[in-house]
Image (tube, rainbow, N blue to C red):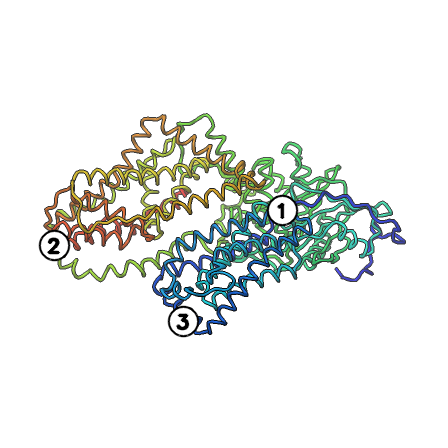
Amino acid sequence: MSERPGINLPSVAAGGAQAAAAPVIDAPPPRDVRRAADLSRLLVSGALLVVTVLPAVATRASTRRMQQGLLDAATALAPGLRDGLVGTVQVVAVVAPVLVLGVLVARRRGDAILRVVPAAALGALVAWSVTHLALMRGRPDLWPQVLVGRGGLVHAGWPSAVYLAACAAAVVAAGPWLDTRLRRTWWTLTVVCAGLSVAAAAVVPLEAAAALAVGGVAGSAVLLLAGGPADRPAPQVVADAVVACGIPLAALRETPSPDRRPGEGVRYAAETTTGARLAVQVLGPEDRNRDLFHRLARLTMLRHPADTAALSPLAAVEHELLMLVFAGRTGARVAEPVIAYPVAGGGALLVTVERAARPLSAFPGEQMTDQVLTGVWTSVARLQEHRLAHRALRPEHILVEPDGASRLTAFARAQLGATPDALGSDIAELLATTATHVGAHRATQCALAGLGPRQLATALPYLQPLALLGPARREVARYDQARARAAGTGAKRRTVRPGGRPSLLRDLSAEVVAATGAEPARLAHLARFTWKSVFGLVGAFLVLHLALPQFANAPAVLTALHDANWWWVLVVLPVTFISQAFSTCLQMGTIPARLPFGPTYEVQFASSFLNRITPSNVGGMALNLRYLQKTGIETGAATASVGLQSLAGAVSNAVVAAGFFAWTGRHHAGVHLHLPAGRYVLPAVALTLAAGCLLGVTAPGRRFLREKVWPFLHAATSTVTGIASDPAKLALLVGGALGLPFIQVVGLALSVHAFGGDLPFAQVGAVYMAARLVANAAPVPGGLGALEAGLIAGLTALGLAAGAATSAVLVYRLLTFWLNVPLGALALGLVQRKGYV
């Protein structure tokens, strides 16, 4: 644990004199990896891009005035000074990219050039799209005029924001192959060029900021897809550090492990001149960056993450060495530690005694004997008794020797004096991950033999997905998904049960209760945020921002209610319940399996509540997807079903709208649909082609297509094919999709009639569908505000009195929109208690 090379070593590692011969190093050639630093830069740059573009889109007039003020300050400079600044920027903009490419060519970094060129092209394409689609309308009126008659080497408007974005993307893409000083120099030049261009009024301020953000996004995206060199010490540097810490090294060989997780470093097998065998784990800056994402995820999701502070590689290996020493003192069988030592370049290494052993995860289920598993749990019991939490207790971190003895490894995140949450999560994690190999019953019985009933029962509150954050959670999810897929094989028309999806954690909970005789325990409250709390906050904001202004018309509604025909108002009330019945039919018609009507009807009411507090029906779609998954339907098929619902709804709205428009035979004033789709077609097609090329020409992209996209498309295709071959499903799909908009038109017509309106049904339908199409473009839940304005404008354009039109629309929305809020909230709580979602 010291940086001094004079530390005393165990006899297994120490040798008398240092070997004279250089150690033999066996390591594969360096390979490109997807680095955590690039993902961090992508997220930060994306956030900056959103922050830059959002004001220009949401507050266009204010943005124009702000930029106008900045340009007024720039035009106050002397013309000669401004032209001098522009000329300087233009010289740097020409020379700097040439120098970067020259450095890469001189160093024979063809792999870097293959990242720089696509990154620059992608940055230019994205910047051009963002500029023309979002930022152009935010340009101040003064800006085009200040460029007239000015110039440096060329026209004063060059380099443009598009060129700056290309340069920034190229610098990011070339960064891994440049040393720190050179990389900072190029970044400084790019930022200074953007700043000087703004100061000389050659580039609009927001466009310059967006160009830098786009460059970070494009360059990082290319590096993530194509890969880059890892931020880890080279094998020769590792060998030098091993020798420097006093170990007489004879040979060093890298040992790739398929079970090694991101952030756990690189492992080497070392042999000393005395014949001793050692295991060397090396951490670098790359592993520290990946650990940052792990800690951020736990900090965001858990109430009490109990994570240590950010540690440097040296501090991390020193911590792990200390935990190994303490764990060994408890009586648990763990890897035998030797030394922790720094490595040049910011890395560090941890040396342990290597034994002939294999990870437990490498054993097939039938080879995981009860003796081996019980021995593992006995070591875990010693850790639990001394309140030492491992916090990464999975089969890949357990080594099994030929005689069946096991040793625990990977104590990097271990914690002394651990909380009950951490200790219980340890047991739950190992229990769940071993159960994916040997089944819930055997895993529980082995844990009972090693831990005892009292200690095993402490895991009951933590048999939940959130306690298994990370690889264990994904492994359990894959196991349950495979069981659900196997249950549905050969039964395309099977009847599914809500909440009936196979659940390993639920099975384990039942096994633990039966084995220990303990009472079923409530799950521990681990989540910092739940989707319910998030939706509640969003809903509260939207209600304050959008709903409260609606009450400004409450006096007019109350006045009109005195003259309303209450019998017709009451007739509107069933529209809400009939609408959910059509929505249920639509849901049932988009999945080959047979869904029960009652539970699906309840889920649709709950979805309607979430749609009231989330834009574009996102909340309802997420709840429907969760409902289908909980019934045991494969994720790809469930996603295809939800997508098919949205598509069917859009098509049915267009069909019903066309029918009503043709029926009326008139074009009513006040209903204008202006959809400038042509402006978006070319950028969208270009960005899609660029993304497709990056996915197709890079190994990670092809692997993503092979492992994620094609299986999903296959499941979605099977779902659509199954529905198309079933007339009953088609009838439910078509009936539900067409019935939804039609019953809403009926509700509006009844509301209009209740207030004395005598408009023809076809005209009311045309008004509703026109307002619905316009409101769908508004990024607010249910078209709140936009739909009301469109309906009132359309009805008054048809000759209905303004007071009657306003009252009819507000009463209609009260009974068909706001009534869903309390009913949907009750339904949401009900389906949660029943385990449907």
Q: Measured from the top left, where is residue 239 in percent x and y?
A: 78, 51
Helix, strand or loop for disc 2:
loop
124 or 747: nearer the viewer: 124
| Mark 2 vs 1, N-terminal side | 1
Q: Measured from the top left, where is residue 50 in percent x and y?
A: 44, 57
Q: Measured from the top left, where is residue 26 in percent x and y?
A: 77, 43
482 or 646: nearer the viewer: 646
Residue annotated with mark 3 = 72
Label 1, label 3: how many angstroms apart (C-alpha)?
A: 48 Å
What's the mark number on residue 33? 1
| Mark 2 vs 3, N-terminal side | 3
Left or right: 666 in relation to 213: left
Residue 388 in view, yes or no? no
Residue drawn where x is 41% and y is 37% of the image: 640
Label 2, label 3: how many angstroms apart (C-alpha)?
A: 50 Å
Q: Amino acid at mark 3?
A: Asp
Q: Measured from the top left, where is residue 371 in percent x and y?
A: 68, 37
Left or right: 727 in relation to 155: left
Residue annotated with mark 2 = 801
**Contact flag, marks 2 and 3 (Cβ < 8 Å):** no
Label 2, label 1: how many angstroms apart (C-alpha)?
A: 68 Å
